[in-house]
Image (tube, helix red, strand yellow):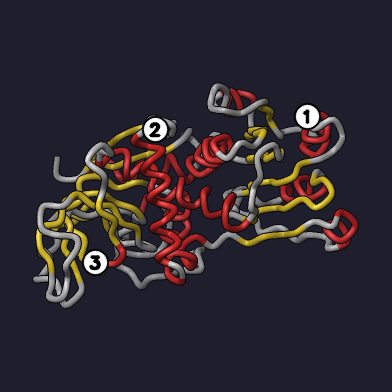
Amino acid sequence: MKALIAPRLGGPDELEVADLPDPSAPGAGEVVVAVSHVGLNFHDTLVVSGSHVVRPEPPFSPGSEYAGTVVAVGSGVSSPAVGDRVAGNEEYGCAREFVTARADRVTVLPADVSSLDAATVLVTYATAFHALVQRADVRPGETVVVLGAAGGVGSAAVDVADLLGARVLAGASTAERARSAAGRGASAVFDYSGDAKQRIKDLTDGRGADVVFDPVGGALTDSAVRALGWGGRLLVVGFASGEIPAVKLNLPLVKGASLVGVFFGEFVRRDRRRHEQNLTTIFRWSSAGKLRPYVHDVLPLEEGAGAYAALAGGAATGKIVLTVGQ
């Protein structure tokens, strides 16, 4: 099989396509999936560089979400069955023609959700949903500020917050990237290249945000905490800026605010039942045409290194998907 491989830890330029042996027969409780699409996520670039908390030993394949068709099942597996279209996510290892996975880590797709759509929404929308529903308990009418709204998980958060009935303010690093979030359910868009705290305060008539969804980190987080209203919640989703911020704890104290961690991968491991319930809602929204995933590009596996370079360098707006075996 063909696979995108990181032979050593480093940047996307280290990635290469290699021929590997086809997978052996699945073990007990496992399935083999012929992959058709791989969704790329920013955290994949951190795994490849060796700067993620998950640090696999090279060589390994990047890629944390995929969709395809089950081609073999191991003993004790009642579902999925051979021929079922499924989607799944792992910390890494998905950018290849075949993935062997535990049967309880794949989800059978509804007939009206395409494999491309599944690979587009599985991780980003499930992360946003978990963050906004389980971690922040967003209520209709609350104001949710989404930072990094032009990226994959940020654009998903705009959609989810809107569907939850929140007033959404979408922020991005430049005016051009902010405009890409317009028309996606946001009440207003803004760029935070200047005074982000003041922009948020102005857009909330001085009240501040109820929730800030922050996948960016760095210096922007300090502004986001200062822009929270009373009882606000800052969702710590990631550090796309490359800098892990230090927060002055007097700020959440005087605001009665909360700093809430969002570790999607660990949530999936610890509470698979809740995750499946979340996916049921997400795929129902997808079937009804309520989701608006922004796809920056769909590229063949052979162009994976360039695709990851675009993602790591901030050149991508929205989601990049690789096609496999097509």
The spot of residue 277 in percent (x, y) is: 42, 56
* Crowding at mark 3 (Cα within 10 Å: few <14, some 14-19, many 20+): many
Q: Nearer the viewer, mark 2 or mark 3?
A: 3
Q: Look at label 2 and name its amino acid.
A: Val
Residue 91 in sight in this render: yes
Q: CA distance from mark 2 to mark 1?
A: 28 Å
The spot of residue 214 in percent (x, y) is: 64, 48
Q: Earlier in the sequence, mark 2 or mark 1?
A: 1
Q: Earlier in the sequence, mark 2 or mark 3?
A: 3
Residue that label 3 marks: 103
- Please tell me in which quadrant of the rendered image residue 21 appears: bottom left
Residue at (14, 39) in percent of width and height? 326
Along the line of sight, the residue nearer the viewer: 148 or 187 = 187
**Disc marking residue 203:** 1
- Residue 244 vs residue 17: left or right? right
Residue that label 2 marks: 295
In the rendered image, the quadrant that contains the N terminus is: bottom left
- Residue 239 vs residue 220: left or right? left
Q: CA distance from mark 1 to mark 3?
A: 46 Å
Identify the element where label 3 is drawn: helix
Residue at (48, 68) in percent of width and height? 266
- Residue 173 vs residue 291: left or right? right
The spot of residue 65 in percent (x, y) is: 34, 53
